Structures are given as structure tokens and as C-alpha cells.
């Protein structure tokens, strides 16, 4: 689950980590009022969406008059902002963050993330922070500095010193940085984050270090014990179909193809999508109804898949282990009748009572295409997705 920048900074401030002063606003009038309350002669207005690349897309503007704050907020609010990370449709801007400006001497990059290879939290830092960090990582990966945190000890003093020296920090900036790293690690652990990214981490003209931007992603599996964080979820930033699936407790990810996929098991779902692509098609989604799929979850899966107007065929791939294939077949028949499916439906059943399940589908009188194998199912789906 992603958080907005203003939410992430609230969490940082609650942990006694300094950030630029700012206020979120959901209207142009509120944005102008926030600027007046902050005082000063210049402000930065930032669109609040769950995607990076806002600056290049026109979603971050520095202005020098309250009237300009109002105009920029009015331009951004209620529109979709399209960036390199959320193209082609973009995401709606429902709030802007109005912040004070700072005298910036340098821009650095800093992030904490879960390194699955080492099973530790990794710290990634670079002296080349800012909007071009993706190009830096791609073209000159040697400019990325890395340290790994001990699960028991967290961030060690020597790691803070090593990174600070490598980033050429001295004086107050050095001291700020060495205090900041352990504090950010505690925020990461205490909130079950999967990513904490600060880009840029700035060195100010008076040689202080603080986060100018902040992105946080919370581990979805931890939300049951992080109720306060779960309450910060902005469903407006999520694909409408994914929002419906989330409410139904179904694992669904929207994709750009035209073949809807309904599978029980994440690994099997990935294999199904790979085979569709191998046969020349494009999956429209990832949908895992789980190992204990029921007629109700199958019907719900159909409803979610068919919310996508691009779907031209549906491929159902079920392995009957925990659940019997004849039960799933009954659920498919019931769902096709209930939902009124108007596109071709290809079904591949394997496992417990697979023969009985295929017989039920054949006797249903519905336009359901039974496949003998997964390869055959993929071929039928691609053929009928016209």
C-alpha cells in the first residue's frame, strides 16, 4: 500500500524527523490559505498521487505569489496527472501539498528497502539525487552506495559514517545524516514498510540535511496489525477494478491485454499469463481466486474481469487440489448464467474430479470451451480474443 507524500512526512514528523513545513489542500482556496499561513515569499505546490516522475510531468511547481499558488492548485486538482510511472491514464490529483521553499545546495538520494536476497533491509544512497536518479541507476550503477542493516542491531554507527563520508558530508550535515539514518530505519521497521524513499534528500545552504520528498510503501500483509496506516489508503489512486477486487478480498492486478485470466494459485496464474503471451496473446489481468476457490469467488472473479471493457475472452485455469474440479465447474456454470458473460470462456480443469468437471461443462449447454491442456487453453483463448 502506497502513501501520499504528505502522509509520509506526517509519519516522519511524528518520529521527530524534520521536514519542510507544509500543508495538504483539496481546493485552490485551501492551497492559497496554506501558503498565507506558512508565510514567506515562495512556495512549492506538489500534486499528491501514488507515482513518481511528478516534476517532469508538471506536477511540482515553485511559485512566488499566493495568486500563483491558487492558479497552480486549480490547474492540478480534479485532473489526472500522467507521469512516466502511471501512463497512459495517469492518476487523479485530489490534493496538493503546499510547502515552504528551502535554499538547496545539493540533492542526494536515500532509500530503505527489503533486499530479498540477503533477507535484510538495505540502504541505498547516492550523491546524484533528484529527478534523474533512474537514469543514474541505469547508466552508472557504481554511483549507488549500499549498506545492509543487521536484523538485531539495525543501522550501525560505522555504516552511517561510511555513507556520510562517501556522500562528502561534513559539519552539521554529517551530524544530521548520522542521526537521520537510524531514525529512518526505526520508522521503516515500526510501520512494516517495504520501501522508504527520499528523493531528494537535500543539503541546505546552511549545511543541514532533511528530506525534501518522501515516498512510503507499506507491506500489505501487515495492514491487519497496522490499522492506523490502513486507514490512510487512498482507493482513488488505485485502478477501479483493483479497488473492487480489494473490497472483495480477491488478488487482482489490471494489465493492458484483452484476455481475462482467472486462476487458483499465484504461480499457476503467472504461468498462465506467460503461456498466453507465448501464444501471441496479451493477458488483461492477474487474478488469483485462491486455492480454496468457491462458486461465489468464481462469480466475483467474473464480475471483476468483465469490468474491463477490453476483455474479449476469459481463460479459467483451475487445478483441483484443495477444491474439487466438479465444484468449480458448477461455480463456473452458475457464474456464467448469473453474470451474463457475453465473451468466449475457455476452461482448463486438472486435478481432483477433473473428468466430472469437464462433463458438467459439456452438458451445460453454455458456450464454454473446454481445453485438454494449458497449452490448448492458451491457444483457444488467443484464437477467440478477436
Image (cartoon, rainbow, N blue to C red):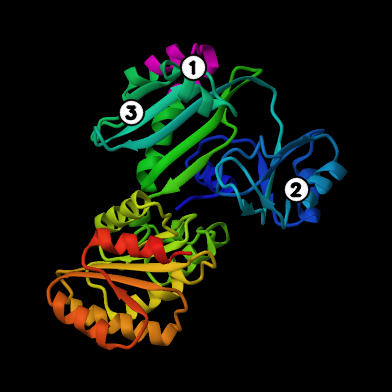
Q: Which mark is residue 322?
A: none
Taking the spot 29% from the left edge, 88% from the top edge, the residue there is 364
Q: Position of residue 35 (x, y in %)?
A: 78, 44
Marks 1 and 3, Cα distance to the nearest angstrom? Answer: 16 Å
The range drawn in magenta is 161-178
* Crowd class of label 3 (few under 14; some 14 to 19; many from 20; radius 10 Å): many
The image's mark for residue 174 is: 1
- For disc 3, the marked residue is 155
Please give the name of the residue rendered at 51% of the width and 22% of the height, measured from the top-left corner. Answer: 136
Res 273 seen here: yes
Answer with mark 1 or mark 3, whichever residue precedes in sequence.
3
Under tag 2, what secondary structure?
helix
Label 3 near label 1: C-beta < 8 Å? no
Position of residue 216 measured from the top left corner of the image (x, y, whole percent): 47, 44
Neighbourhood count class around disc 2 (C-alpha, 10 Å): few under 14, some 14–19, many 20 upward: many
Q: Quadrant of residue 196?
A: top left
Residue 225 rendering spot, x and y as whole percentages: 34, 59
Establish if 265 lies above or below 55: below
Q: Point out the residue furthest to the front here.
A: 383
Query: In this orientation, which residue lies closer to the viewer: 102 or 335?
Result: 335
The secondary structure making up most of the magenta span is helix
> Which residue, given by chain and number where applicable, does mark 2 sit on?
34
Magenta highlight on residue 173 = yes
Write the residue at 59% across / 47% down: 87
Q: Earlier in the sequence, mark 1 or mark 2?
A: 2
Disc 2 and disc 3 in contact, CB within 8 angstroms: no
What distance separates the C-alpha of mark 1 from that of mark 2? 32 Å
- Left or right relative to 337: residue 209: right
Q: Within the magenta stretch, is there residue 48?
A: no
Amino acid at each position: 500500500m502506497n502513501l501520499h507524500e504528505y502522509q509520509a512526512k506526517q509519519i516522519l514528523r511524528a518520529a521527530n524527523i524534520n521536514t519542510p513545513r507544509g500543508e495538504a489542500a483539496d481546493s485552490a482556496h485551501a492551497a492559497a490559505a496554506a501558503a498565507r499561513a506558512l508565510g514567506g515569499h515562495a512556495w512549492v505546490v506538489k500534486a499528491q498521487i501514488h507515482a513518481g516522475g511528478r516534476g517532469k510531468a508538471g506536477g511540482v511547481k515553485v511559485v512566488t505569489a499566493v495568486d500563483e499558488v491558487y492558479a497552480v492548485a486549480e490547474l492540478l486538482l480534479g485532473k489526472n496527472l500522467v507521469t512516466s510511472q502511471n501512463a497512459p491514464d495517469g492518476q487523479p490529483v485530489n490534493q496538493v501539498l503546499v510547502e515552504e521553499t528551502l535554499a538547496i545546495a545539493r540533492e542526494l538520494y536515500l532509500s530503505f528497502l527489503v533486499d530479498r536476497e540477503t533477507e535484510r533491509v538495505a540502504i541505498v544512497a547516492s550523491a546524484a539525487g533528484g529527478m534523474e536518479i533512474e537514469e543514474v541507476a541505469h547508466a552508472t550503477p557504481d554511483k549507488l552506495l549500499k549498506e545492509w542493516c543487521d536484523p538485531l542491531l539495525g543501522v550501525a554507527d560505522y555504516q552511517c559514517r561510511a555513507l556520510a563520508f562517501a556522500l562528502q558530508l561534513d559539519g552539521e550535515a554529517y551530524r544530521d545524516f548520522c542521526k537521520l539514518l537510524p531514525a529512518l530505519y526505526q520508522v521503516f521497521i515500526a510501520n512494516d514498510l517495504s520501501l522508504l524513499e527520499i528523493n531528494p534528500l537535500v543539503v541546505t545552504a546552511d549545511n543541514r540535511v532533511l528530506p525534501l520528498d518522501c515516498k512510503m510503501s507499506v507491506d500489505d500483509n501487515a495492514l491487519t496489525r497496522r490499522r492506523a496506516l490502513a486507514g490512510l489508503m487512498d482507493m482513488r489512486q488505485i485502478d477501479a477494478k483493483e479497488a473492487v477486487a480489494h473490497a472483495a478480498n480477491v488478488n487482482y492486478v489490471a494489465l493492458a491485454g484483452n484476455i481475462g485470466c482467472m486462476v487458483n494459485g499465484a504461480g499457476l496464474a503467472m504461468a498462465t499469463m506467460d503461456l498466453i503471451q507465448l501464444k501471441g496473446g496479451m493477458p488483461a489481468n492477474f487474478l488469483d481466486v485462491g486455492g480454496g476457490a468457491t462458486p461465489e469467488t468464481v462469480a466475483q472473479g467474473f464480475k471483476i474481469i468483465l469490468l474491463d471493457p477490453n476483455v474479449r475472452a476469459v481463460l479459467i485455469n483451475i487445478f483441483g487440489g484443495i477444491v474439487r474440479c466438479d465444484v468449480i465447474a458448477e461455480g463456473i456454470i452458475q457464474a456464467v448464467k448469473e453474470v451474463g458473460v457475453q465473451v468466449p470462456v475457455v476452461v482448463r480443469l486438472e486435478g481432483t474430479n477433473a473428468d466430472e468437471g469437464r462433463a458438467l461443462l459439456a452438458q451445460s449447454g453454455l458456450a464454454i470451451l473446454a481445453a485438454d491442456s494449458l497449452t490448448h487453453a492458451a491457444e483457444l483463448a488467443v484464437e477467440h480474443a478477436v
